[in-house]
Amino acid sequence: MSYKSYHQPNRLFAGITLLTALLSLSLTACQSTSSTNLVQGSRYETTTQASSNRSIDKQEVARVRTSLAAQYIRKNELDTAQRQLEKAFAADSRYAPAYDMMGVLLQQEGSRLNLEKADYYFKQAIKLDPEFEQARNNYGVYLSQMQRYAEAAEQFEIAGSALGYEGRIGALENLGRTYLQLNDRPAAATAFLRALDGNRNSLIAHIELVDLLLEQQRVPQAQRLYDETLMLVQNQSSSPRLLLQGIKLAAAQNDKATRHQLAQQLLSAYPLSEEAKQLKTWLNNPEASWQ
């Protein structure tokens, strides 16, 4: 089960063109992100009269270094990203996005020692800025990876309740999947419905809710959501999970032709998938419930 993590906080990135003016060191910068991801200004900037140009410059250095680190992380150049973040901390030791990014970096490296270290950096980002929703979502992803699901749900709930946060729908999707791990189906359904309320095109919420409705034998509602899901993916190949959902719906409505067609498609296209295994088990014993 995958969770949505955000390696690159949109609000923290100023243009890479600031680098020459702000840094005296010679750097080899990777290609900058799209303009939609390079948001000028943030509430981390010092804007009071008492702030010196030097303190503003330090914040800008931290911002640019963190931006570069995010790009290196996406390229899996983790050692280079580490060095950029160390320079971000040296410039501004209270720059919360740098701590969040370090947590992401250590999590991506994945060794036991670095996974343990990541916890501190995510916590520090949130301590420095309790309203940093993206850090909360990323920390939730980390906690889920560590199977600390109850703690993860707390972080996703906070991020998913923050109106105006760009990643809010993803946080709600993560919240629903976390509740599934906790075997709390009603809470999971509520989270996915909240995601749909915020974005009717949430594919994850559609797919998860179809399964939850099928478990409750609410076939008409599941069919409507399934039809919506097919419209969302109309130009893409059906996944084994979608095919199996279609088979279950067809079987529940005694639509033998559709069931046979989708079963053939699943077994042909994804013969080694877990969904194909479930289908074969069910075909051998149609009276049994789906596993």
Image: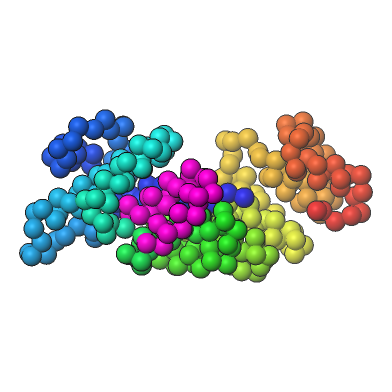
- Seen at 41% across and 38% down, the residue is 78
Judge by depth and name the residue closer to the eye, 113 or 101. Answer: 113
- Seen at 14% across and 50% down, the residue is 57
- Seen at 73% across and 31% down, the residue is 269
Q: How is the image coloured?
A: rainbow
State which quadrant residue 82 falls in.
Answer: top left
Residue 115 falls within the magenta-colored stretch: yes
How far from the left and from the top, in percent, is residue 178? 59, 60
Range of residues picked out in magenta: 97-124
**Is 260 rendered above or below residue 119?**
above
- Seen at 90% across and 50% down, the residue is 286
**Is 219 rendered above or below residue 16?**
below
Judge by depth and name the residue closer to the eye, 8 or 267. Answer: 8
How far from the left and from the top, in percent, is residue 47? 14, 61
Q: Is residue 253 visible in this depiction of the protein?
A: no
Left or right side of 150 for 25: left
How far from the left and from the top, in percent, is residue 11? 30, 53
How far from the left and from the top, in percent, is residue 263? 80, 39
Q: Is residue 136 visible in this depiction of the protein?
A: yes
